[in-house]
Image (cartoon, rainbow, N blue to C red):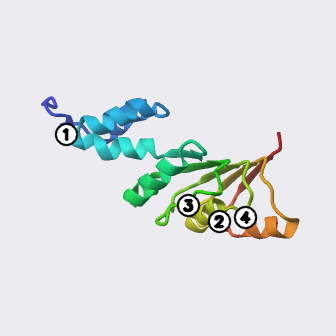
Amino acid sequence: MSHPTYLSDLPLELHLQILGCFRGDKRTLHACALTCKLWHELAQRTLYDSVQVDAKNTTAFRYAVDLRPQLTNHIRELTLSAVPRLTNPPSKLHTPKVQLLRLVGMDMSHPWVKAVIAACKLSVQMLSLRDCFTGDLETFLAFLQEMPYLRNIELEHA
């Protein structure tokens, strides 16, 4: 039996398991992405698996998406948390694999909410709303109907 002598000789599943151990540790995953070409794409998959956009990182997220729109293909969980209205959503927002969408402190008519729903409405299966608001019940129901594969809704008011 021969032993792998190069990192690239290891099975892909092993690379993914190694990087999966760092899920949630953005600093380490970023370092892994910069370590070698083989891990660059794999680490980015893990880095962008779960994304939170808030007042602190709205501009950075928008810049990253405009620069490299393919990164949004990795997002499975997306959280919008009190995103300021002054910043427009990315023009190339394409999030076809978002399964869990969390909205925190958002107005349903917010441009970011509309852009995200337009981009991922066919993939969202779980929706979490915390301290969100809308004009009326009809608007809220129309919002929910935009997501045909929605299975679970979690509503919370702090």
Tell me: 3 left or right of 38. Answer: left
Judged from the image, the secondary structure of the residue bearing numbered disc 3 is loop
Whole-Å distance between the Cαs marked 2 and 1? 42 Å
Q: Point out which mark residue 89 bears.
A: 3
Q: Quadrant of the C terminus?
A: top right
Judged from the image, the secondary structure of the residue bearing numbered disc 1 is helix
Of residue 2 and residue 101, the one placed in the foreground of this image is 101
Proximity of marks 3 and 2: CB atoms separated by less than 8 Å: no
> Is residue 45 at least partly visible in the picture?
yes
Residue 148 horizontal/vertical position (percent): 67, 68
Tell me: 86 left or right of 61. Answer: right
To which residue does mark 2 refer? 114
The 10 Å Cα crowd at callout 3, few under 14, some 14 to 19, many 20 or more, is: many
Name the residue rendered at 40%, 46% in the picture.
45
Nearest to the eye among marks 1 and 4: give it. 4
Residue 80 horizontal/vertical position (percent): 63, 50
Proximity of marks 2 and 1: CB atoms separated by less than 8 Å: no
Name the residue rendered at 62%, 57% in the picture.
86
Whole-Å distance between the Cαs marked 3 and 2? 9 Å
To which residue does mark 1 refer? 8
Q: Earlier in the sequence, mark 3 or mark 2?
A: 3
Q: Earlier in the sequence, mark 2 or mark 1?
A: 1
To which residue does mark 4 refer? 109
Judged from the image, the secondary structure of the residue bearing numbered disc 4 is loop
Above or below, 7 against 129 in this view is above
Above or below, 149 against 158 in this view is below
What's the amino acid at mark 2? Answer: Lys
